[in-house]
Image (spheres, coloured by chain):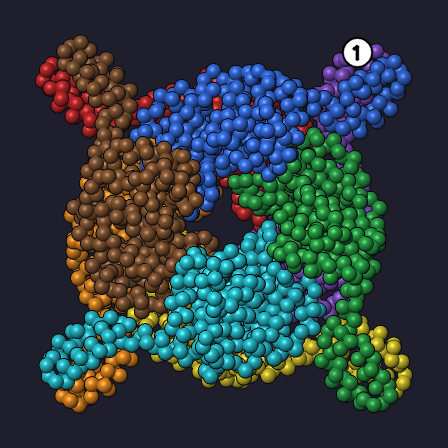
Chain colours: A blue, B red, C purple, D green, E yellow, F cyan, G orange, H brown
Amino acid sequence: MDLRRLRDLLDRVGRGQTPVEDALTELKDLPYADLGYASVDHHRAIRQGAPEVILAHGKTPAQVIGIARELARTGQNVLVTRLDADKAPAVCAALPELKYVALSRTATIEQAPVPVLGTRPVALVSAGTGDLPVAEECAETLRMLGASVERIYDVGVAGIHRLLDRRDVFERASVVVVVAGMEGALPSVVGGIVAGPVIAVPTSVGYGVSFGGLTALAGMLSSCASGVVVCNIDNGFGAGFAAARILRARERY
Amino acid sequence: MDLRRLRDLLDRVGRGQTPVEDALTELKDLPYADLGYASVDHHRAIRQGAPEVILAHGKTPAQVIGIARELARTGQNVLVTRLDADKAPAVCAALPELKYVALSRTATIEQAPVPVLGTRPVALVSAGTGDLPVAEECAETLRMLGASVERIYDVGVAGIHRLLDRRDVFERASVVVVVAGMEGALPSVVGGIVAGPVIAVPTSVGYGVSFGGLTALAGMLSSCASGVVVCNIDNGFGAGFAAARILRARERY
Amino acid sequence: MDLRRLRDLLDRVGRGQTPVEDALTELKDLPYADLGYASVDHHRAIRQGAPEVILAHGKTPAQVIGIARELARTGQNVLVTRLDADKAPAVCAALPELKYVALSRTATIEQAPVPVLGTRPVALVSAGTGDLPVAEECAETLRMLGASVERIYDVGVAGIHRLLDRRDVFERASVVVVVAGMEGALPSVVGGIVAGPVIAVPTSVGYGVSFGGLTALAGMLSSCASGVVVCNIDNGFGAGFAAARILRARERY
Amino acid sequence: MDLRRLRDLLDRVGRGQTPVEDALTELKDLPYADLGYASVDHHRAIRQGAPEVILAHGKTPAQVIGIARELARTGQNVLVTRLDADKAPAVCAALPELKYVALSRTATIEQAPVPVLGTRPVALVSAGTGDLPVAEECAETLRMLGASVERIYDVGVAGIHRLLDRRDVFERASVVVVVAGMEGALPSVVGGIVAGPVIAVPTSVGYGVSFGGLTALAGMLSSCASGVVVCNIDNGFGAGFAAARILRARERY
Amino acid sequence: MDLRRLRDLLDRVGRGQTPVEDALTELKDLPYADLGYASVDHHRAIRQGAPEVILAHGKTPAQVIGIARELARTGQNVLVTRLDADKAPAVCAALPELKYVALSRTATIEQAPVPVLGTRPVALVSAGTGDLPVAEECAETLRMLGASVERIYDVGVAGIHRLLDRRDVFERASVVVVVAGMEGALPSVVGGIVAGPVIAVPTSVGYGVSFGGLTALAGMLSSCASGVVVCNIDNGFGAGFAAARILRARERY
Amino acid sequence: MDLRRLRDLLDRVGRGQTPVEDALTELKDLPYADLGYASVDHHRAIRQGAPEVILAHGKTPAQVIGIARELARTGQNVLVTRLDADKAPAVCAALPELKYVALSRTATIEQAPVPVLGTRPVALVSAGTGDLPVAEECAETLRMLGASVERIYDVGVAGIHRLLDRRDVFERASVVVVVAGMEGALPSVVGGIVAGPVIAVPTSVGYGVSFGGLTALAGMLSSCASGVVVCNIDNGFGAGFAAARILRARERY
Amino acid sequence: MDLRRLRDLLDRVGRGQTPVEDALTELKDLPYADLGYASVDHHRAIRQGAPEVILAHGKTPAQVIGIARELARTGQNVLVTRLDADKAPAVCAALPELKYVALSRTATIEQAPVPVLGTRPVALVSAGTGDLPVAEECAETLRMLGASVERIYDVGVAGIHRLLDRRDVFERASVVVVVAGMEGALPSVVGGIVAGPVIAVPTSVGYGVSFGGLTALAGMLSSCASGVVVCNIDNGFGAGFAAARILRARERY
Amino acid sequence: MDLRRLRDLLDRVGRGQTPVEDALTELKDLPYADLGYASVDHHRAIRQGAPEVILAHGKTPAQVIGIARELARTGQNVLVTRLDADKAPAVCAALPELKYVALSRTATIEQAPVPVLGTRPVALVSAGTGDLPVAEECAETLRMLGASVERIYDVGVAGIHRLLDRRDVFERASVVVVVAGMEGALPSVVGGIVAGPVIAVPTSVGYGVSFGGLTALAGMLSSCASGVVVCNIDNGFGAGFAAARILRARERY
């Protein structure tokens, strides 16, 4: 039941055409979303300028193309994540308006303006070359959500002074996202320096008992720095989205 | 080298008693913290009114008493977490100023004013009776950090309408903390309803393949709701601290 | 918003006291359950005679007593599961109407008639003495849900003829529940003999690589007998409830 | 010993050619299946119209072809599951009567009529595009077993209203099969809405701590909705077969 | 159907009272064990002098007493394993004929002669003091099964010469059982020296990554010595029984 | 120090050229193997006719060729295991005397007579088509070690009568090797029927929670049938070798 | 064969009483250790002043007392590790010469002089109060092995400046032992600052995904600092012994 | 702030142009590394002749080339590890000065003299052919760090005499590195023979419950030989670097 149908019902009650008890019965069976719930969703999307997101992992190129084309038709921005190098050519050939970034494995369609989110940058910290795809996925996500990013790359706990040298960036950041693999110790150090929100993203970089990122994940969850929060392994998108959740709600704190 | 010693050095340079090159050599070996780093830490603690925190888990009553007494002496507030019922009597007997809450397993000393943190409440959602100790640990942490809390207890995904009925609380909350055990599905549902930050805390409630909270933890990290961030199992304190990190930095977004 | 309030609104619309657009606005914000959803829940409970269930595991005796007393006050039947021997005395002393069964670790209050569920018995198969608490938890659950039970105890795959001798019970059963620990092979053999539904319950019986029931669980999920479905480790209640779901819906097949 | 030999023996006893004690001795050593056990199996297969099933996973194309050809020769229907795209061409080329469905990775030979199983549809719920192969494997299995299917695809707990909107399908279904990956929360929500049997199938969709479906599996087994039963990861066939077990035994409840 | 009933049937066929076809029908439904299968079992037990075994782990003292008393009544020997020190007094008080050995956690009733099994001893090798309960459980099992044992205790791979000094025992043993915890390397060394059967038993001795015996278990299964076979963790009884299986079948090689 | 050097020393002592104390000192530092230990090894190999074995897994074709050629040069038989189809052509091309069997992934050179090992066959039981490579690796190993094999293939616990029909083979076998994947229940059933040695080999056949054979392995180790011993996953060679260890030592029981 | 017997043999050869070939035969069968190997062991112990070590974990008080008494009788020093508070009173009462340290759970008998090992101290770094028992076990081990220790306690990566302030101790240490629980990040930071050997000891301090020390262990093994080596969880003794191995061999580098 | 800027500041203080308090303020904000910390790092690198190391795993050929070219430009030696055969051609084509060793998967540029590290060789022990890549990675690392290596290859615990025969090498080695897969028992045996430092490296050689090296790793950490330290799975580089840490610090013991 959409709004139109609900208004019709109320009109009929108002005109005495439908008895109150009959209207009551009809309303009881009303599916939830018909009460404008979906449109609230819709409104929120429009108000926030958030892009529609497609996780390409586990989808065929044809499926990615189909969904992206459908979404793009409505005029919204589109963010495709985990679009690996072997799928990207087929997808990009079918959708020339897609802008593909190989390092972050993301592809985007920007056709609607992206409202600025937050007045200060998100600091994006990562340790090694292998963490870059995840960090850049986070950066692309933040860009599409309207947040600015300041990168602190190639810092690690085994060379702690390189991290400490960049304390100025931490000072001016609204949120700090830390991307690290191997032992995942970086967020603990950052969490000890920074007073604001710290979001940790473990990566699958490493071998042996790195367990494909599980060691970094468990290390981050066990962090001795209080209040560090964690995303799934390699989930740069999730970290960016979580940072945006924080920035988006700024008027509420 | 403390500030006094550094000023002496500069005085001697200013008076020509110490050549520049000698001063240079002395400064190169200067330990880091002597440059006021520790005092910055100190200033931040005073500015924020954050209590000193003692994790009682893994400590003897005597150790908890010793540390708490030392901290209390400085006039700061103290928050003891994970103070189990078997240790609490001994600790509380030795420190009568401690206020112990059995449900949350926390004990506190409030002797300094706690500055108000944020203008809107943190929504604290939990599913079952077994999750209460973790949720209340979070609540006590938030209280000691100056944040207000609005509780939504005893809602679960298997009775989804009870959760949906409380949508008004989600609307007015600054941050939502979701505490859940078993399959840990609650944050996914909440994350689909709420636009602001959602912090998920898995609990060790459950048996069999609940794996002491691992299933809930992995479920929360794998959440199909974007941007949900996660704390360690049963880490109500960490979730409260993470929420405070978000509130604390409000002037930055 | 309850029914009364909804009727008032419609009355006011019908009398022209409330404009349609205002009513529309008010209805949009209507919480879901106010539309009779909760009462549907209520009706279903009454129609089915299902008892209210309290999982005592992870709750204090005081909490169990409080919830059981509250539920019993409404005249419904109550089933308490996982009420271990150390908690039972306190709970039973406070609620004399509770009937406690030590083997199944269950306690029940029967004050409403239990409608008969199904015309044929549920066959309840288990292997060893250690599996009995789980099997009897299932039996008590089935009894409280109105199903009859036929037990086949002390059969195991290492003495296969004892199982095969009881083929007559399998023939007349509506559903077969198989409770087994260690290697959990019993459901595979039963699933090869029985054409109807087979519900497998792994138990934590065993040691070493029994992994507290994980080996039985994984074995049951990997069963070479097609269509065997599985419950959580030691979840006799869940298996009984699942059997009741099947029996309850008999008019639908 | 087959029936012929058994009849000969009894004939000889009846004619007095074999003393009772000798017959007794001979009967004691009688292999089990010779007593018509195998034919009972045979009869059941014919009575139920169930197809013979070949799990192609772990078999070479030549092995699949050989077994399928052998089965097809007897006039029965054949269902091949897990026939991946790299094996399918060779198998289908050798057996032109096979109908291959790429999405479900199944191939079928329908040469015998499939008796209708059940009077109401099985509701088949799934969350994402990546779950479709498993859901469709279940659908093909149900179709070959004679059950009708009603699909509810692309619903997820993070958009809970889309699921609630389809409550009518749940109302009319005999059994609900829920296919979900990632955190596997969908069956908990469905189990809270539906009173009949709910069969959950975890899928290997997801990454990081999805652990190839283990998180969804453990979440489903730990479900806070009572009586949800679970199949192995990606086992759409098993879920379909389990649903058929329930439907098949309808006359028994 | 027991033997008496089968004889009656054959008698009736022999007297022409029952037609062959009717007898055939009746025989088809004959339960398996009625054909003397159980008595074969019975005969084998008597022929081998094997004791009846009760695993006390997971049973209450009352259950152990009940089963042991029942078994003892038939005149057979009884072996109770995993009878921990907290249960033993109650059990032994109720059954004064039980002989309890604290180190091996076994209790035995010897009332029937134990036939000698094998002409050469089983060599029983173990590493440390903590492995003794498992080794002695194996020794008691072997003793009750009629095999003689020669112990080589307190040898370890980190003091390899102590092991090599006992090569003479290996030379004269029929089977070698190796009991070891921690890294479980002993069977690999023994397997390289001994040409006959080597049965490895991992123990839960150790801490940290010993994982309660899993590391020793996995090490033994991964052994670089060919043809070493392995039992469950701490399963001294199983190793003894396996050795007896080998000795028992000596006439067959 | 080789024998020659030792004889020289004794000669010198005998001729009074070397004082006893000096000889004593020299002997104390004598490396172990110089005392003929290695030659004992050599003698044992010749006496038993055991082939030299090369595990091709983890070796390059060039490495396999090099080792096999070296071994073949000495006139001994050679058994190459785990020679996958992608490596086999290169290896077989370089060593035309190798006889390759694709199903078992083994290659052999038979140039020395293989002494017969045991007077009764080893029964080799397996469940499904996917288990055949492992079963046949075991069969080839047994053949090269001189043991005869009787196969019982395509029996499973879900069709228990097919297994029970073959009880005659179990009766005449010296050792039973059971190869099974998925839930690994077959050895439990066999162990309950057979009195002699039962060696279980889990295979990596299965998916989902089969965990690449771990579930079968843990199930076999947890078997409710006493005295079943277990090999590593897919280790058909190890099971064959273990059976040969039993047969080889027959004169000792 | 002991030295006496060997000398007899050589005497007989020297006197011509035993032909060289006979002596050769006898020597070939000589057990290894008889060649003075054990005495080499003995000499090494005396030369190094190393104490005999008893791991009390998994032993009864009676066993600990028995072994300690036996060792003490020879005049050597004795180190008992993992002597928990519940066992210590009984052990200490029986052996008054034992000096028990509750924090480190060690007990020692010093009756022989301990030679000094190394000229520079071992730096012993630990993070929290909960790590102290492990760190002090390491300290006691080092003390009994003759090494001096310099402690750096209560430093952690979340307060990195406290660690950096102690760089002077790292400068003068021969070996650095780092004891840490939770995420185990400390060795990575230390390994980046220190050029000499760094031995990391994970502790079981923490909860949830600390997994009883596994997260710290895996983090240390995955350390981004090159050449950090690791001991078992809570193995302070092992770390101390490893440091002593390095110091002991100083003349060799 | 670099040295130049610091000198300027002090000059200004010395000339009275900058008040002491202003200098104090400026110095407080001084980034750490500007105090010459980085140059200390630089000096250490030059003093030790250590090569710069690039872990090729997880990097694209282009990234490896870029980093290697940048490092080579400074005149330092370069060590590339984990350069698999599929990446090596592209990398070597772009950097002709790279010397690639396929077995160890390393590539090196030697353009600066490598100072000799230690006076005695590092003993490098490994068990099987499959362990060679890891052992040789360690050897190449040691070579580039200036240490000499003595190899003891193809020794295993199942042929213990081959290991014992090489006791002379252990005698003269400064450090022993033991590389082993499967059950990882070799370091326990070596640790029992050798008094100096023993570094164990588990390899991923093996199958089934070798778990990709985890079994060897856990076995080594659980070693019954005291003071054996362990590196990550397959981390030959780390073991070499750890040995160099020991040799490098020789003047300190």
Residue at 13% from the left image edge and 17% from the top image edge: B13
Residue at 20% from the left image edge and 76% from the top image edge: F5
Q: Nearest the camera: C35 or C219?
A: C219
Element on which disc 1 rests = loop
For the question of whether residue E160 can be seen, the reply is no
For the question of whether residue F65 can be seen, the reply is yes
Q: Nearest the camera: G47 or E164?
A: E164
Q: Amino acid at mark 1?
A: Pro
F80 with respect to D57 (left or right): left
E164 with respect to F243 (left or right): left
G188 with respect to F24 (left or right): right
Q: Which residue is mark 1?
A: C19
Count of numbered marks: 1
How crowded pointer 1 is (Cα within 10 Å; few <14, some 14-19, many 20+) is rated as some
Q: Nearest the camera: C100 or F228?
A: F228
Can you give x and y, in whole percent of width and height, for residue G211 in the image? 45, 46
Task: Name the image quarter holding residue D206.
Answer: top right
B162 with respect to F226 (left or right): right
- F243 up-or-down from F54: above or below: below
Please, which chain is the residue tagged with disc 1 on? C
Residue at 61% from the left image edge and 46% from the top image edge: D217
- In the picture, which quadrant includes the N terminus of chain C? top right
* Furthest-top residue in this view: H17
Can you give x and y, in whole percent of width and height, for residue A105 in the image? 51, 31
Residue at 19% from the left image edge and 75% from the top image edge: F27
- E111 up-or-down from G65: above or below: below
Q: Nearest the camera: H106 or A150?
A: H106
Can you give x and y, in whole percent of width and height, for residue C234 in the image? 62, 53
